[in-house]
Amino acid sequence: MGARINLEPYPALGNLVNEIGPELGGNAQQKTYYEDDKKLKAVLNESNISLFLNYHANRVEMDGNKIVKVIAQNLETGEKQAFSAPLFADCTGDGTIGYLAGAEYMSGRESREKFNEPTAPEKADNLTMGISVQWFSETTEHTSTFPNIKWGLPWSEEKSFAITRGDWDWETGMGKDMINETEFIRDYGLLVVYSNWSFLKNHHSEKEKFENESLKWVAYVGGKRESRRLVGDYILTENDLTGRNLMPDGTAPTSWTIDLHYPDAENSKQFDGEAFRSIAEHIKIYPYPIPFRCLYSKDIDNLLMAGRDISVSHVALGTVRLMRTGGMMGEVIGMAASISNERKAIPREIYQNHFSALEKLMLEGIGNPNLTNNQDYNLGATLMETGSIK
Ligand SMILES: Cc1cc2nc3c(=O)[nH]c(=O)nc-3n(C[C@H](O)[C@H](O)[C@H](O)COP(=O)(O)OP(=O)(O)OC[C@H]3O[C@@H](n4cnc5c(N)ncnc54)[C@H](O)[C@@H]3O)c2cc1C
């Protein structure tokens, strides 16, 4: 996982992320790398959490600007379940709860003029970062074969990638509709993995190098980076981050570079505009505390957000989309929910009237503060020195 936790001005933020997060990092690795059991155990041990796995929220009921119920359907049994609550959090990545409730959202890239961002394109467009279908092979003692598939894409030595693992840059769907074309994008991701692997095993000039490689895992869930961003009372932009335009309602610091992905031009040319390889461009920033106003919807009175669907421009998403940063946002909105419950205040009122209470909780933190933070920081994209950011 990239991005830092335990940073000024709220060094206790991230303790919970650290407690449940994996020790190791890296994409497309064996499942033991991700320690999902540890996360599940932590949730099951928490008496205040009721866990509903495999339920997909697909409807909301409203009372004016408030959500009163979220209705979700079990993906295996089809059973429907209604959830009533005074407050909801949209952590769906796709901003689905906000969308169903009628909240304003943004998608694609904003024009340069819209937020005066140097990195934005002159004209708005629908380019987003893509979906990755990751994969890896394992080296075995015996040789193995792979079918010479007839349903794959036309492949050649020039088009092939003689590799044993599809990392983050095995990425596709940029420019497609990340909500309505998700399955097409995922299926294309699968198609190129199998087309390439079949070519390596059956036709490549160095195919003997792959004789003892066996395709071990291909993700059937595409990893998404970007879709809807719900609009809050504040929209974080590139200039806030690079110009250190600090806000009075700063919360969890975002610390990764502004890391934006684009289709690899050569790969795009070879595959008629359907690139499945990407490049990343990085802009370094100092850690920047994300304003609380980016973590609730401007339109829906009782809707908080955390993760990649918060209120940021496309460019600013490049840094806040990191897992540990999103995890800290989760800590913050959990704290905000407790204040909301105690003081009968909607999120906007926490910003207006109760922000000092949230500050106090952010300083105290939750989770075990005594664990060492032994996760490395994905040093590929190094951070500018932090100094004091208060
Ligand atoms: C290949 C790849 C490599 C990456 N590498 C890194 C890295 O090294 N370090 C890093 O920090 N970040 C990395 N990122 C970015 C990071 O993983 C994402 O930005 C981050 O996971 C976004 O988290 P999220 O919880 O906001 O959204 P998501 O990860 O999209 O999670 C949303 C969750 O909500 C669930 N959900 C969605 N809709 C509904 C619904 N209607 N009802 C119920 N549940 C729903 C989904 O099933 C999912 O579990 C990578 C991303 C990709 C794709």
Image (tube, rainbow, N blue to C red):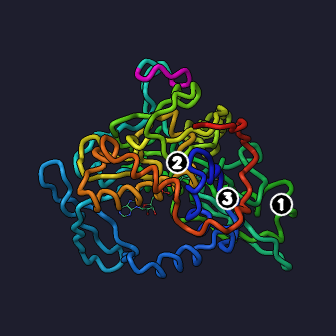
Q: Nearer the viewer, mark 3 or mark 2?
A: 2
Q: How far across and how far down the image is residue 297, in percent?
A: 31, 44
Label 2 within 8 A of ligand 1 by Cβ: no
Q: Quadrant of residue 268?
A: top right
117 or 342: nearer the viewer: 342
Ligand 1 within 8 angstroms of badge 3 C-beta: yes
- For the residues carrying marks 1 and 3, which lies nearer the camera in this image? 3
Side of 18 relative to 136 (left or right)? left
Instruction: Tell me the chief SS of the magenta region.
Output: loop
Q: Amino acid at mark 3?
A: Asn
Q: What count of labels does the image hold?
A: 3
Circle number at residue 207: 1
Q: Which residues are magenta?
A: 114-120
Mark 1: amino acid: Lys
The answer to whether residue 45 is above or below residue 246 is below
Q: Residue at x 52, y 64 (%)?
A: 366
**Spatial CA span between label 2 and label 1:** 49 Å
Q: Viewer-proximal residue, 304 or 245?
A: 245
- Tag 2: residue type? Ala
Question: Disc 2 marks which residue?
Answer: 252
